[in-house]
Image: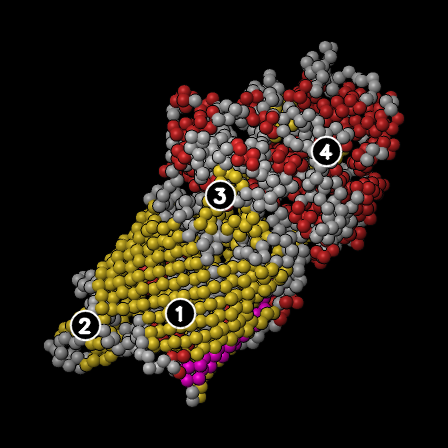
Amino acid sequence: MAQERVITGMVTEGEEGIPVIGGTVIIKGTNIGTSTGVNGQYQITARGPEDILVFQFIGLSTKEVPVGDRTIIDINLEVETTALDELVVIGYGTQKKSDLTGSVAVISAEELIKTNAATLDRALQGKAAGVVVTNTSGAPGAGVSIKIRGIGSINRDSEPLYVIDGVPAGSLTTLNPADIASVQVLKDASATAIYGARGSNGVIIIETKRGVAGPPKVNFSAYAGVAQVTKLFDVMDTNEYIGLLEDAYALDPDRDMPFYYNDSVRASNGNVYTDWQEEMFRPAWNQNYSLSVYGGGENSNYGISGNYYQEDGVRFQSQFERINLRATSDFKIGKRLRIGESLTITQTNSDNNGGSWGTAIEASPLMPIYDSTAIGGYAGPTDTITVNNDRTNPIAAMNLKDNNTSLTRILASIYAELEIFKGFTYKLTLGFDYKTRLGFNWNPEYELGNIGLRSNPESTLSQSTNESMYLLIQNIFTYENSFGDHNIRVMAGHTTEQTNTDNYSATAQGFVNPELNVFAQSTLYQVITGGRNEHKIESYLARVSYDYQGKYLLTASIRRDGSTNFGPAYRYGYFPSFSVGWKISEDFLQQVDQINMLKVRFGYGATGNENIGSFQYLERMDKPTNSWYVFGMDQNTYYGGTTLATHGNPDVRWESAKMTNFGLDLFAFNNKLQFSAEYYVKNQDNMLVSVPLPTVMGKLSFKGVANPFVNLGKVQNRGFEFNAIWKKSIGNFQYSVNANVTTIKNEVLYLPGDDIWNQSATTVTTEGHTIGSFFGYVGEGIFQSQEEIDNHATQESGTAPGDIKFKDLNHDGVITDMDRTIIGKALPDLDLGFGFEASYNGFDFSIFLHGMQGNNVYNRFRSSVGMGTDRSGSDINKLREVMTDHWSEENPSTTMVRLATLDPNDNDRFSSWFVEDASFMRIQNMQIGYTLPGQLIRNISRLRVYASVNNLYTFTKYSGYDPEVGPNFDSSIGNYSPLDMGFDNGPYPMPRVIQFGVQADF
Amino acid sequence: MVLAGCSEEWLEIEPQNELTTAQFYRNEADALAATTSAYDPLHSVGLYALDYQFIFYSHDDRVLIEFPLWNDLMFKSNEQSRIFPMYEYLFRGVYRTNMVLENVPGIEMDESLKQRLLAEAKFLRAFYYFNLRIIFNEPPLVLRVIKVVEESKLPNNSAAEIWAQIEADLQDAIDVLPETYDPANTGRATKGAALSLLGKAYLYQQKWEQATETLGMVIDSGVYQLSMPAGTDSIDYVNAYLSNFTPVAMPASNGGVYKAENNSESIFEIQNDDKEKGWNVYIGGYGTNGTLLSAYFSIIGWRNIAPTAEFVNQFEEAPVDHPSGLKYDPRRYASVYAEGDTIETREGFDHYNELFNPTKHVNLIINQGYQVRKYLYPLHSENANSPYVDPNNWRAIRYSDVLLMYAEAEYHAHGSTPVAVAALNQVRERAGMPPVTEITPEVIIHERDVELGLECLRFHDLVRWSLLPSPWVQPADMVSGFVVGKNEYLPIPLTEITKMEGLLKQNPGW
């Protein structure tokens, strides 16, 4: 033991000698090891001079150094794999980054973790050109809308396909961002065609972390933070509210102000003032803990991780919780066989009892919160207190109801890979994705005032169960070889996938004791409904990659998909693609040292979208509960009727997209600069359009969802994408800058038959314009005098000075619905991401900005609480600026309308007056961290503490709460509706989140 | 196994939640279900559960409607969101009757039942077309199931063609339909319903002779009787009449009751479930188990309508010796609430037993001192569970209407004959009002006003009598602009006109 001694030293990398943080130092043949600290320093106890130290770090060459008699060993590791050699996961295989000929964006684990986002999908925002991520809600655990290269379908899902560890499985919200090793986004058809009928909206491939050889690496990270709404609407208090009503009624010769608004009456009611927004929102806490162990030996490796995440919503009675357990391992059996698995079990719970922000803004400040005499204990709108204002008590239902959803998911895959002979391998993958979603909705009996039907007279319990099971069997053969300068790689495979879903739900009433809200305690009326679905896909796929001297690159692929979503006539589809690349820098520019690689590439391919729902090809009968009648003297015997539900279209087939992609990649200045530029044109030729049948065909659904689909629409998306990364070190100071820019032009080229409207006829999808363009009147100003009204086209009989003047587009002298036109679009022209990171002596700083330009938002609140007129005549509360700035003869405003108890001019009609430019640039995340020097604390090799702010500040001209407005969720299609984008109806607000965290390696 | 490609059969799957058309129309149960589906549109929100009343209350010069913009929309704009469902649901009805008429004949089943179901379908097709004709003027006549979009581009059919089809369908139905059904089948179309609708169709065409003859057959059948007061108390006179508009039987002074739904004077009634399932049923879809009339129009609801004072003034003072001692025609008390009346909602419910107060119980914008009581009273009291879904049946054809139509047709065909006078006096007698001695157009107009007011018949009557525009008694800022030659009909929905690619012409003036 005498020879045991402590060795210290410094590990650096590359020519510039940058410290290697978190590198591994082990004594060869033992489990003794440590990791390097923040300055690359390490300390290890060697047993004797014969010991050999092994220095390892991903991406750097491994070095073995005999200890000898030294006590200080400094070592420099060479950069082994440059960015050029990075392996990128493409569908059913990998490829070197420099050899890519398709359009693939890679997002690293570090980038994702830096966002401190609770879910992986939110972390993707602004990270890659061509990937537009829009938050749809600030609710805890809420999903986002992800669109890769525009919108290619007006029906439902334009969301990409997600492939997690090789299993094409939807939904990212169950993943722990800390488990992610890398995310690659396949964008163009030459890359996505290998996913055939599901590739047209792009593919996001997620690889999770796996163990590497070496001693166990334990990582613990935690953060806690607080979220708050960034602002509230500035609405009037009671005195201002009454004051404005007095003014409004004084201007109205036909309506007297209700007696109950008088001071004396209000005084007898206690002169209530309720600030509803204050009652609705809170500062909310969130916390996250992750613990992982990765390691391995010569023939096996392992990884285990656990995560607990919990977030309270800024609105009371909302929260999200996620528990996540994960295990992976890989085993080498003999020389030719490798097997492995990954298993993730997740449980999420989310509570959201509702509570409309819009109602909190419009509700009467005169309404008290509580009323102990009412069932439930809350006050509501009454004809003697709130009088005309029938908006409900927004706090009551939120506190009384109980609405939550839980999801249990088991995602697993097992693989076996056999090298049959050198270069020829066979890989079998079995995938399994099981989900159970339980819904619970309790709406107890309560009374809320006596107007507007706001009470709930009967306690109601609804529960639902939704189970789905997905199975994958995937066989892939790969052959790889070089013949002189010719390098070839061939992949061929067969996959079968099957999804079975089973759902049922029940509703019951008549609870004897409202404390016991279980079905067993109900005595009345039980609705039970449910159904089963099956979906199968069978596919053959093949891909050939060839290059000559690594300079001239060619990839071609084809996939044949058969899907049960299509009838026998069109059940199978073929999706071919090819792409070529030329590394110009290999033939020319070799003398230019600054350029490491310059490559141009071109790709073309066909992909599809099969997600149109099942059995669209069949004529189906409606269920009896959808058409029934009562016969008989007892008046409660039902007779189910049955009639045709859907006119089938036996010819229905894939929505196919043909995409052409031009790209240029540049690596320069010793790979410190990475730049790529792309241009694409994506033509969707067979877009499924639900043909609105004339009523003479017995038009079956008000919304048209039951109409048959035909493959006739044509949509084009095109745009440029730029991506640049610059990394540099100056001594201990390192920094990197990255930026990406996406342009999007979405245009409907052809539609069979009519224009397509959303349900409220406020957006139109028509040839020559963007999908879901806003459609309405053009507000051109405020009438300043009766003379101006008389000289203008006739609007309404009650139009008066101070009302909005609408443009007479067809010059017929009357403002009618023929004077509506396209007045904006929700899709941005540009999406931008910009990041900057720097570190110096243990300190690190990063900032990330995300912005959009050219997107319009319809600001609904300006059409209600932002105006002096009041369509419903229900005396809703208003913004303070209405009180101070409304139009009057003394204040001839050109932006604000007059004051009135009603809205005779129909000022709030859907018009350009409320469509705003919602371009914005947001400081999405800013982080400051410090990594403690040396091994200050025993057993901790690295300890970083940091503070982070999400949604720090938004630069925008938009006057509403948040310019980032996602598409509305359409429950009838179970998806975000591409026809209902950009409506700011007061969604769950996106909060500002401040977090403090710690990351420790042991 | 996993290496081998799967067979093509692996991708052949059958729907597990729905039948395909190939699996249907195979037995008696299928025939019954198919026929039931043809009745279903009647009780939808697009027709008698809300929109029909919404539109024809608004069009009624005896009714004020709350929304200031509503009449503007009604009479000026053809982008009217309530018109579209009505057009759609009427055609949905036509479509479903055509499905029955095409598919049921091939089913092997009891022949007499099959013939009855086909006759019911013909009655319903005529019923839907009668409404299409008087509301939308000259829509396309669709007598088969159209399966291909290319075959769906249809032009208008003339009024004469539509009337002819209505008459033919009803003649066929009359030959087959039974006069009554067993209690389990109450609510299905009867022979009397078909005769009454045919008589009404003749009346609207001013075919007075045929109308007299057909409506006379209803009267002579002896199937229908007005329910007469059982005593001389005021509740007898009010309730004998009021029971025609309530979901529950109304008490008589002798301890008995006046039967309400499907009583002896009901000829065709839209059936609503009395065990309704709640508000959510409406939210969940465009269908409901009951009507939404109370929710929209009644005192406990949104109070969107109110009767005009002019309407209330139409009721005569009762003779001093009226047995009930009531001051006015008893029908006035059943039709409207006036000061002094007590509101009888369900115990424990809003406004229970309150004294009627116009400033509290009527929407102030349209308050002329009265509130509608007919059909909205008693506020459905049976089910605490769903106070806003009303189980009340809508009496689409009442015997009183048949008697008054008969009197009118007889008057035009043969003058003020004793049978005409007797038919009209039968209606007055039930109210205890003195008989008239002579029929004149004014007498008919008046009697229809007080007997059939607030039943969404008045607008159609005024149109067929060419009495519009009547002095619309709305407050000044709500005056609607009824234009002769235009507003007799509603516009055909624009979307439908567009789909017909120029073949279908819009109604004049729209």
* Horizontal relation, residue B475 to residue A944: left or right: right
| Three-letter code, disc 3 | Trp
Residue A272 picture location, percent across and down? 39, 28
Tag 3 subunit: A
Mark 4: secondary structure: loop
Residue sitting nearer the eye, B366 or A477: B366
The relative height of residue B442 versus residue B510 in the rendered view (above or below) is above
Distance between the alpha carbons at the discs numbered 3 and 1:
40 Å
Q: Is residue A318 magenta?
A: no
Distance between the alpha carbons at the discs numbered 4 and 3:
37 Å
Tag 2 subunit: A
Q: Earlier in the sequence, mark 2 or mark 3?
A: 2
Mark 4 lies on residue: B484
Q: Quadrant of residue A5?
A: bottom left
Residue A220 can be seen, yes or no: no
Mark 2: secondary structure: strand
* Horizontal relation, residue A147 to residue B270: left or right: left
Q: Which mark is residue A676?
A: 1
Mark 3 lies on residue: A913
| Three-letter code, disc 1 | Ser
Magenta segment: A542-566
Badges 1 and 2: C-beta atoms under 8 Å apart?
no
